[in-house]
Image (cartoon, helix red, strand yellow):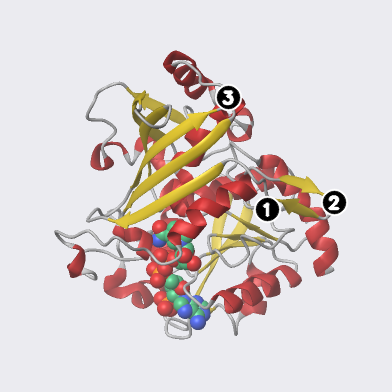
């Protein structure tokens, strides 16, 4: 595989820092541009991030002295240095939409963590093990944008990266209804305990927009390409409640599900054990070997013990049992800034490279 030069737009933020770590020493990618807001532009990466470095691993030496560019004003400089960019910025939705399309129109593909384009009908929202075929809609998107190689592809919200992987393969039994309650880490809000002391010893029962995303986004993932768009599915129906809990990293979900054809517990465990997809077939660098990992112990999985499973790219599942009102209940866990954000985007970019979408 050839090496691709890549940029990180939003490099100074929580997700941007994860990208910095994941992309350093990546076998296919080489970071050649960093961009953020005008507050950071012109400074070295080390200076721009300053005390905001929130990772347990140190900042990569190779990036410390790289000058941060302005994501908006320096767009031509950024695109001249890269084959494509990863994007994770905290801006208004319409500004992000415009910014990502601007990069695409400069013939620079964008792999995005932002929610702005998730419901643009010709933008694929991909969990690579589940709906890799949705990337084919990129041909329609390029026609709309009038580009040769520029496009936007997005990953879904971090909340659903734990329960959608476990539920998707079970839909062969016909999911009738599903209720999820998520317990979400503070890094999901771009925060640490130092920067959000109110979260110590506390639970906040509201995360703006999260419940809507958790209910609606799975339907696009379940959707089908029809003509020039991805038409979201109308089933399965999800209802979600999302809580912020005092955990640094890792989103847990408690799931209740009923089926049209109720499977046995053994059948469910078999489906999970055997579920894999394009990343495993293509042996992509960030593909976990075992995507869904079932823990038999009653007190597992645990956020602190299991969030980093397979580099934070695998999903942990446990406590599968019958329920009194639904058919079954179980819990799922995924790392929100790895599988749920930067890692999920890197895996998507690897898929796009393997399928030729990043070639010049
Ligand atoms: N954290 C997660 O677990 C997670 C998961 C999935 C998706 N996301 C999404 O990823 C995005 C970033 O989240 P985050 O948690 O990394 O946020 P964050 O820590 O607040 O970082 C925000 C980034 O955006 C940049 N930025 C802010 N205003 C800008 C402007 N006007 N022009 C250009 N860049 C600007 C910041 O640069 P400065 O440092 O220069 O201000 C910083 O690099 C959001 O859309 C979020 O919803 C986050």
Q: Residues within 10 Å of mark 3 (few under 14, many from 20)?
A: some
Between disc 1 and disc 2, whose residue precedes? Answer: 1
Q: Residues within 10 Å of mark 2 (few under 14, many from 20)?
A: few
Mark 1 — residue? 124
User: In this image, 338 relative to 125: left or right?
Assistant: left
Q: Which type of secondary structure does the marked residue at label 1 adopt?
A: loop
Q: Quadrant of ligand 1?
A: bottom left
Q: CA distance from mark 1 to mark 3?
A: 26 Å
State the image coordinates of residue 277 (x, y, percent, origin top left).
60, 31
User: In this image, 5 relative to 23: left or right?
Assistant: right
Q: Are marks 1 and 2 in contact (CB under 8 Å)?
A: no
Q: Residues within 10 Å of mark 1 (few under 14, many from 20)?
A: many
Q: Is residue 214 visible?
A: yes
Mark 2 — residue? 227
Q: Which type of secondary structure does the marked residue at label 2 adopt?
A: loop
Seen at 60% across and 37% down, the residue is 130
Q: CA distance from mark 2 to mark 3?
A: 28 Å
Q: Where's the N terminus, which quadrant?
A: top right
State the image coordinates of residue 305 (x, y, percent, origin top left).
25, 37
Front one among 317 and 56: 317
Between disc 1 and disc 3, whose residue precedes? Answer: 1
Q: Which type of secondary structure does the marked residue at label 3 adopt?
A: helix
């Amino acid at each position: 595989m050839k090496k691709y030069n890549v940029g990180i737009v939003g490099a100074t933020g929580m997700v941007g820092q994860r990208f910095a770590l994941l992309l350093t020493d990546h076998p296919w990618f080489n970071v050649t541009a960093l961009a953020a807001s005008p507050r950071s532009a012109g400074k070295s990466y080390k200076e721009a991030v300053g005390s905001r470095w929130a990772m347990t691993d140190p900042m990569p030496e190779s990036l410390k002295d790289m000058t941060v560019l302005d994501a908006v004003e320096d767009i031509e400089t950024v695109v001249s240095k890269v084959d494509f960019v990863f994007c994770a910025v905290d801006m208004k939705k319409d500004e992000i939409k415009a910014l990502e399309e601007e990069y695409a129109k400069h013939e620079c593909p964008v792999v995005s963590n932002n929610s702005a384009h998730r419901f643009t009908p010709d933008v694929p929202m991909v969990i690579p093990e589940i709906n890799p075929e949705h990337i084919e809609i990129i041909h329609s998107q390029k026609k709309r944008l009038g580009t040769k190689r520029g496009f936007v592809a997005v990953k879904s919200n971090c909340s659903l990266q734990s329960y959608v992987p476990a539920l998707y393969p079970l839909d062969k039994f016909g999911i009738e209804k599903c209720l999820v309650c998520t317990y979400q880490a503070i890094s999901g809000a771009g925060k640490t305990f130092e920067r959000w002391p109110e979260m110590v010893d506390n639970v906040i029962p509201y995360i703006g927009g999260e419940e809507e995303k958790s209910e609606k986004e799975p339907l696009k993932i379940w959707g089908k390409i029809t003509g020039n768009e991805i038409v979201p599915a109308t089933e399965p129906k999800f209802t979600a409640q999302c809580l912020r809990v005092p955990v640094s990293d890792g989103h847990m979900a408690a799931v209740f599900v009923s089926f049209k054809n109720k499977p046995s517990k053994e059948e469910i465990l078999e489906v999970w054990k055997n579920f894999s997809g394009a990343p495993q077939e293509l042996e992509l660098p960030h593909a976990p070997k075992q995507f869904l990992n079932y823990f038999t112990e009653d007190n597992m999985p645990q956020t602190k013990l299991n969030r980093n499973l397979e580099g934070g790219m695998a999903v942990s599942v446990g406590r599968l049992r019958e329920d009194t009102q639904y058919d079954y209940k179980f819990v799922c866990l995924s790392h929100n800034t790895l599988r749920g954000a930067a890692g999920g985007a890197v895996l998507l970019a690897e898929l796009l490279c393997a399928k030729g979408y990043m070639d010049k």
